[in-house]
Image (cartoon, rainbow, N blue to C red):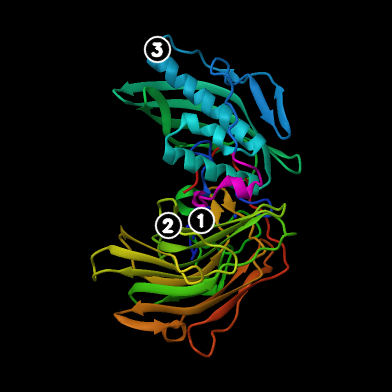
């Protein structure tokens, strides 16, 4: 769903999400700053609960000196400002430079104080939500501080009420075990005028290159949650087929192939996370495509454990390669949820996605346009992935799937009739993390069990943007 997630729910393709396709016991990998740090994206959760703090407003740093304060874990302390290229004399250009500098400082502050609200004044609503998700993923992966150490300016172009600005930025990310990672990226910002002030609406890193640490997974092949990845002891592969060998680095559950699938449905119970477990993320979903293809339309629920007893739950939709989107349906541990994805008319590319919280009685339905290969159907528990790899899987205990059906070649079939194959999720050492049971006697049910084996955290690149 990217939150890999990102996700949400991606991953490296069968990767059967990859949406989100993906997240740790430190969890989500560090997404790019602003939009760049939004790899799981895919997660789309409120940092309030995940981080265990109130969303009180914290004043941003002084606009005149947005980079003179470096916020580190535990508070703010004076710091040497990063090297910054010359500020332009043109008022419009100078205003754009100031908002970008302030946005960088605010993200640093948001990580340190665990309060995303400080980033709201420099971003559009959509971009602010993306950055909030990004920060959640960073904290979940064990990031305790980020620091901008160098910023140089490239071209800045103003076209009426919109503008683009290019920067070269070097960031240092600090983790809970005191290790650090440095990366340098070219950032291409898109800004718009909002109530007379420039705000950031997007931030892309077309050629980010880390200066330390393992090579990151290419974002286009690592959605979060989404595409599953084949188990390896090193960096997750770009493409893997979880159905071929019945294992994956980020998917567990059942997948069916060999037909044209125009609908999929399933019911499960939102898990109660262990209060003493490590940080992690889990995405439960049904989807179409993704096993033998790079397309995937999926919908489900996601649970995030902070590692300090706090947890967060949400419902989401993802259509790769687009990031996952949270849907306005409340879900809580113990809720029974039914999710269906149905093409409205054969060959139309118009899909109806329906949610029903069977416990609360609430429902949600939407329609999306999506060009699907219709090559597979899935019922999955996923460890979402970000642009840098898979986020640790949370301790979800056990999840029971029921009513697992699909429409294959125009006929409604259950798991047994569809010939669905089981997928076991493995960690980097080849140990099972999540194992599906055999299909029940009714042909449409199975249990997903989390083992006591630890997930292996993925490497983090603080600058690279995920799905």
Above-or-below relation of 235 to 131: below
User: Which residue is painted at 30% across and 68% down in the image?
Assistant: 343
Nearest to the observer: residue 110 or residue 331? 331
- What predominant SS class does the magenta segment belong to? loop
| Front position in the image: 50 or 162 | 50
- Which dot marks residue 148? none
Q: Dot 3: within a 10 Å radius of its alpha carbon, few (fewer than 14), some, or many (20 or more) residues? A: few
Q: Residue at x 72, y 66 (%)?
A: 453
Q: Distance of mark 3 from mark 2, alpha carbons? A: 40 Å
- How many marks overall? 3
Q: Earlier in the sequence, mark 2 or mark 1?
A: 1
The magenta stretch is 41-55
> For numbered disc 2, what is the local secondary structure?
strand
Please give the name of the residue rendered at 46% of the width and 58% of the height, measured from the top-left corner. 316
Give percent across and percent down for residue 342: 33, 70
Residue that appears at 62% across and 31% down: 109
> Which residue lies under the disc numbered 3?
91
Can residue 30 be seen by looking at this rendering? Answer: no
Label 2–label 1 contact, CB within 8 A: yes
Give the structural element (helix, strand or loop) at label 3: helix
Quadrant hosting residue 339: bottom left
Say which residue label 1 marks.
Answer: 8
Residue contact at pointers 3 and 1, CB within 8 angstroms: no
| Badge 1 element | loop
Q: Looking at the image, which is closer to me, 110 or 456?
A: 110
- Mark 1, residues whose alpha carbon is within 10 Å: few (<14), some, or many (≥20)? many
Give how far across and how far down residue 33 sits, in percent.
53, 36
Q: Hey, which quadrant is residue 108 in on the image?
A: top right
């Amino acid at each position: 769903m990217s939150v890999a997630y990102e996700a949400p729910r991606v991953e490296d393709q069968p990767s059967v999400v990859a949406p989100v396709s993906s997240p740790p016991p430190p969890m989500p990998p560090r997404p790019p700053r602003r939009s760049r740090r939004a790899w799981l994206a895919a997660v789309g959760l409120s940092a309030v609960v995940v981080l265990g703090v109130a969303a009180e407003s914290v004043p941003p740093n002084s606009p005149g000196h947005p980079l003179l304060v470096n916020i580190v874990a535990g508070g703010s302390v004076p710091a040497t400002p990063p090297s910054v290229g010359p500020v332009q004399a043109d008022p419009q250009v100078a205003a754009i430079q100031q908002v970008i500098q302030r946005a960088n400082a605010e993200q640093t502050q948001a990580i340190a104080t665990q309060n995303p609200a400080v980033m709201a004044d420099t971003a559009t609503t959509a971009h602010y939500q993306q950055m909030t998700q990004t920060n959640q993923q960073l904290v979940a992966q064990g990031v305790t501080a980020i620091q901008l150490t160098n910023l140089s300016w490239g071209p800045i172009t103003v076209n009426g009420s919109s503008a683009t600005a290019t920067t070269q930025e070097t960031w240092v990310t600090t983790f809970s075990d005191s290790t650090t990672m440095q990366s340098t990226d070219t950032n291409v910002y898109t800004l718009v005028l909002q109530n007379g002030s420039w705000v950031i609406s997007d931030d892309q890193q077309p050629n980010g290159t880390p200066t330390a640490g393992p090579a990151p997974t290419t974002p286009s092949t690592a959605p979060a949650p989404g595409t599953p990845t084949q188990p390896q002891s090193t960096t997750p592969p770009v493409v893997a087929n979880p159905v071929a060998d019945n294992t994956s680095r980020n998917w567990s559950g059942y997948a069916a192939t060999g037909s044209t699938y125009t609908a999929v449905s399933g019911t499960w119970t939102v898990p109660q996370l262990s209060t003493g477990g490590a940080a992690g993320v889990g995405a439960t979903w049904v989807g179409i495509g993704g096993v033998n293809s790079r397309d995937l339309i999926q919908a489900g629920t996601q649970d995030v454990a902070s590692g300090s007893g706090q947890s967060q739950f949400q419902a989401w939709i993802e259509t790769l390669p687009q990031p996952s989107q949270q849907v306005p349906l409340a879900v809580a541990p113990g809720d029974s949820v039914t999710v269906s994805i149905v093409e409205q008319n054969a060959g139309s590319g118009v899909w109806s996605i329906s949610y029903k919280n069977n416990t609360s009685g609430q429902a949600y339905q939407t329609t999306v346009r999506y060009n699907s290969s219709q090559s597979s159907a899935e019922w999955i528990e996923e460890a979402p992935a970000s642009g840098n790899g898979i986020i640790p899987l949370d301790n979800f205990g056990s999840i029971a799937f029921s009513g697992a059906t699909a429409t294959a070649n125009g006929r409604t079939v259950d798991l047994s009739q569809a010939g669905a194959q089981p997928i076991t999720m493995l960690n980097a050492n080849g140990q099972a993390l999540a194992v599906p049971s055999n299909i029940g006697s009714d042909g449409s049910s199975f249990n997903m069990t989390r083992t006591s084996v630890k997930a292996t955290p993925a490497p983090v690149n603080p600058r690279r943007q995920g799905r």
